[in-house]
Amino acid sequence: MLRSIRNTLSLVFSSLMNRRGTAALTVASIAVSVALLSVVDRVRTDAQTSFANTISGTDLIVGARSGDLNLLLYSVFRIGNPTNNISWSSYQEIRERREVAWTIPMSLGDAHRGYRVLGTDVGYFEHYRYADDRPLTFAAGEPFASATDAVVGGEVAAQLGYSVGQEIVVSHGLTETSFLTHDDNPFVITGILARTGTPVDRTVHISLGGMDLIHADGRTDFSAIDNDSYEPEALTAALIGLHSKTAIFSLQRFINESESEPMSAVIPGVALQQLWGLIGVAEYALYGVSAMVVLAGVLGLLATLLVSLNERRREMSVLRSVGARPGHIFAMLVSESAVLALFGALLGLAVVQLGILAARQYVLAEFGIQLSAGPRMFDLYVLTGILGISVLVSIIPAWRAYRNSLADGLQVRL
Amino acid sequence: MSSASVDDHSAIAVSDLRFGYGSGNDILNISGLQVGRSERVFLFGPSGCGKSTLLALIGGVLVPRAGTVDILDTSISAMKSAARDRVRANHVGFIFQQFNLVPYLSVVDNVCLPCRYSPRRLDRATESDGSAEKSAARLLDALGIDAELRARKSTDLSVGQQQRVAAARALIGRPEVIIADEPTSSLDMDRRREFIDLLLTECDQSNSAVVFVSHDASLAEHFDRSIDLTDLNSATSSTHAA
């Protein structure tokens, strides 16, 4: 049995080497389809993980009344713009409730050389959590103390070559080059955060006082501001942590039904689910297209095998004359298909690995998605799946070869 | 062994055989054909007289409508197809007119091919020469395919050389029956004689019976016995194959 398998495989390898041109093309087409499917799945799950890792430990996000998704996107992902503000008094009201453990105020709307500027307080560095409840850490320096201090994310520092002690200018508005730059009110970098793989890396953090300083247009002298107790008039949003998860829904209801002003409170996990629901359609489309490409790859394999049958009839009958049974011929074609599919799939997965190693940094910097290297379960499914399908479709040419070899006997007349 | 009857010494025995394709008329009707062990038989017949069909029946690729085909005193016509294939692999070596070699295998691998499908022939080749490859080398040497030629791709050999490689393959593992179907018709006169001499010498060495089929009656002189298939076959219609 083992000898028979070894014999068949060695014949298959010699035969394929003899037709290495077509064999290589078939392997390549399988490789491309497998690589595509593997990449789509990888990017999907990695994007999902990256998104889910962006925020952790926060029980509610509060903002002016708007859609849950919108609130999540601008407060956590720094995507899009807030529709309205919430007043400082409403924020205070929430902060002073018994069930609230901590709050992080957020004031958005400005940019520094293409990176979003977030006005907040030092509680941000203490309470903000990402991934599995990981706190922010400083790669260098410390949190801001005065209104003209700034803490930059890991990517901002790396891309712009910033270091602690450097002076930067923050502009009003979101464009990269704004007319309203105030060289007379420069900020000093007091700290650089370690990379997190989240939008925090692409954010410039300043105090709430600093935020108003930008908007004050130089009319007020803020240098004497007591930064710790500074109270702005309004905020964009706030992150809230509770003592006990059980209070989430009652607080959410309280905020949503607030009579002082229209506000929304969303549970991050729930809003993330909505995000998946939205992206899901595109994902299924991508999977669908990938599956079609895989199908095309397998059909290419089938076509190659079928075309080869006629030119190999003589070869088959020679094998018959030296004692090969029709079953051997059948097994040969099925193994040939399996070998092509196996090599194609392995090549495709190898290409994906190399591609990820090459593109990792770029994707992280550009899209904030941490691509995971190394083989995973899905790759194994793809591998066995394509192997199974290839063996299955190869039954068609194998059966034809089997019939041919019975009909041709020992000598083919061509 | 000496007490055995004549029948017990036949390499091939065909009796009361009838065969036709599909539901067509009989194209072969042979009351009896016997080839003794180590006997050299020349089977003469013009194109279309059913030679190839008879060889396919002896090879166990076709099954007769009636009658029996025995190889080494075992009836293969009663066997299942897998068992017939096994008998062919173990006991019969074939040489055809052309396209004998598998193009993607080396010369030596081509010769060793029967040993892949027949453990018996592998054992016998190993027994006599140490391994299938050594056995192939010895046969190729004897048939004039030297080491330099062996290194070439089998498709780069001349037709005459390819036929000698095919002969070595038929002979490896000393099968009891060698069937040569027009093996010399693509060779010129001198090469024909040389090929037949080499083949018969090697068949003597391995005590194999030879059935040599040709439409060229002048080759009959090399053989112990000559049979005209048109005399043997009493079927009225004939195959129209080439």
Image (tube, coloured by chain):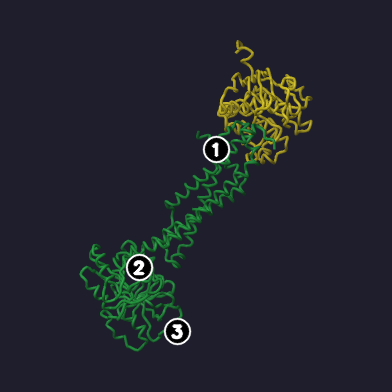
Question: Where is residue A211, by image quadrant?
Answer: bottom left
Label 2, on which residue? A68
User: Earlier along the polypeptide chain: callout 2 or callout 1?
Assistant: 2
Q: What's under tag 3, amino acid-wise?
A: Phe
Chain A representation colour: green
Q: Is residue B78 visible?
A: yes
Q: Chain of mark 2?
A: A
Residue identifier under label 3: A179
Image coordinates for residue B145, horizontal then vertical, percent: 69, 34
Residue A331: numbered disc: 1
Residue B125 image-quadrant placement: top right
**Quick one: label 1, few (<14), some, or many (20+) residues within 10 Å?**
many
The residue depicted at 22 percent of the width and 71 percent of the height is A97
Q: Mark 2 vs mark 3: which is more N-terminal?
A: 2
Residue A265 image point, x, y percent: 30, 69
Disc 2/disc 1 C-alpha distance (Å): 59 Å
User: Tag 3, which chain?
Assistant: A
Taking the view exactly as shown, the residue that stands out farthest to the top is B3
- In the visual, does A362 lie left or right of B15? left
Q: Nearer the viewer, mark 2 or mark 3?
A: 2
